[in-house]
Amino acid sequence: MQTIILKNDTYLLEGYSMVGPLEGKGPLKDYFDYIIKDDTLKEATFEKSERKLLRDIITGAIEKSGLNISDIQFFFGGDLLNQIVSSSFTARELSLPFIGLYSACATMTESLALASIFVDNNLAENVVAGTCTHFSSAERQYRFPLELGNQRPPTAQWTITGGGACVISKTKSNIRINSVTFGKVIDFGISDINNMGAAMAPAACDTILTHIKNRNLTTKDYDMILTGDLGKLGSEILIDLMEHNGVVLGKNYSDCGCMIFDKTERVFMGGSGAGCSASVLNSYLLKKLKNGEFKRVLLVSTGALMSTTTSQQGDTIPGIAHAVEFEYVENKKQSQSKTINFGADEDDKMTRKARSLVSKRSTNTAKSKTKKASKTNTTAISNSKTKKTNLTMKTRDASLFSKKRSTK
């Protein structure tokens, strides 16, 4: 069965979201934890900017949960860049056991689902799952160099700068993860890289239908069903596909790509990117679940599994969608989470916070190694003294034995 029901009370302890300047002007601006003012993050390249963005998101989620990096057993994550370098370089800096993943823009729910299974099966106490994207790094990898200023067709979407991460834990909170559904790869023959919504909508339809069937529920049982980044056109296609299968998506359905930008912003069909559902989950959805406004939510992140090579060779675009089901539960003893607030012109403070956490972990590791080394040296000195004493005693005994023989 594609749906795995979690039986041992697995919770979303806290989440953290961070977005760029354009996203920070949209309808969800009051929900994000942090809006960066300069999307370069004072780095020399956009790829390095994306790395710093993800590192700050991961450390922000951990700190907001009231935990230290040393309390985290695993980091589940991925991104859109080749060889998921943003995530792997972040894992290198944080020195966390890393499980690198790739489902394109569905990476948030993939990482969240696997992290939840680890915790539910008592393989870990606390894990962090997260992803992000950067408009400038993704655009020049998958489409055209930014300097060309290419025109976009009406079906195009806008890769967001931003992302989110959450800590999955055994510690009780009022957001429980009930089940996860892993999607199949679905391909309806779309080959236009500027029409991602149409390529991913069939996969979203298949995953939602599979989930509600396996859970013996209907779409009306959810306060919110949210897809990842189908955008305006993709969402309309999904609604049509669901109706064709006898299921109606009502007012409780929306798409992260349609929510994150204002209608006045020139982003065509809306937002896209792995950071799209990640940032909306860890801001808007999280706060609605926390205050009990939403009792049950289904997040279905969607991804297009093409590469620059397959696109250039004319291949069609396979789609994927993974789903995670959240439920609000009463919990009088709330976790002691921290609220992190920074001014709009203080991007460096977040970086210093991240470095502080990394430095603290390194210092603790160094102290531990020093203690072990000191203990080893003490043992070595003690052994050396014992050997010298034994050698002196042997020499003395040999001398006495020699004198006795000469006396005789």
Image (cartoon, rainbow, N blue to C red):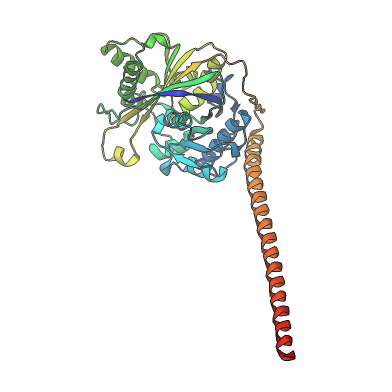
Residue 303 at x, y percent in the picture:
37, 29
- Say which residue appears at 57% left-offset and 20% top-offset: 31
- Say which residue appears at 65% left-offset and 44% top-offset: 359
The answer to which of 365 and 280 lies nearer the viewer is: 365
The answer to which of 332 and 44 lies nearer the viewer is: 332
The reply to whether residue 4 is in sight is yes
The answer to which of 172 and 186 lies nearer the viewer is: 172
Residue 89 at x, y percent in the picture:
51, 44
- Say which residue appears at 62% left-offset and 18% top-offset: 333
Give residue 195's quadrant in the image.
Answer: top left
Give residue 109's quadrant in the image.
Answer: top left
The reply to whether residue 267 is in sight is no
Looking at the figure, which quarter contains the N terminus? Answer: top left
Q: Is 145 above or below relative to 287?
A: below
Q: Is 276 above or below relative to 359?
A: above
- Say which residue appears at 67% left-offset and 70% top-offset: 387
Give residue 103's quadrant in the image.
Answer: top left
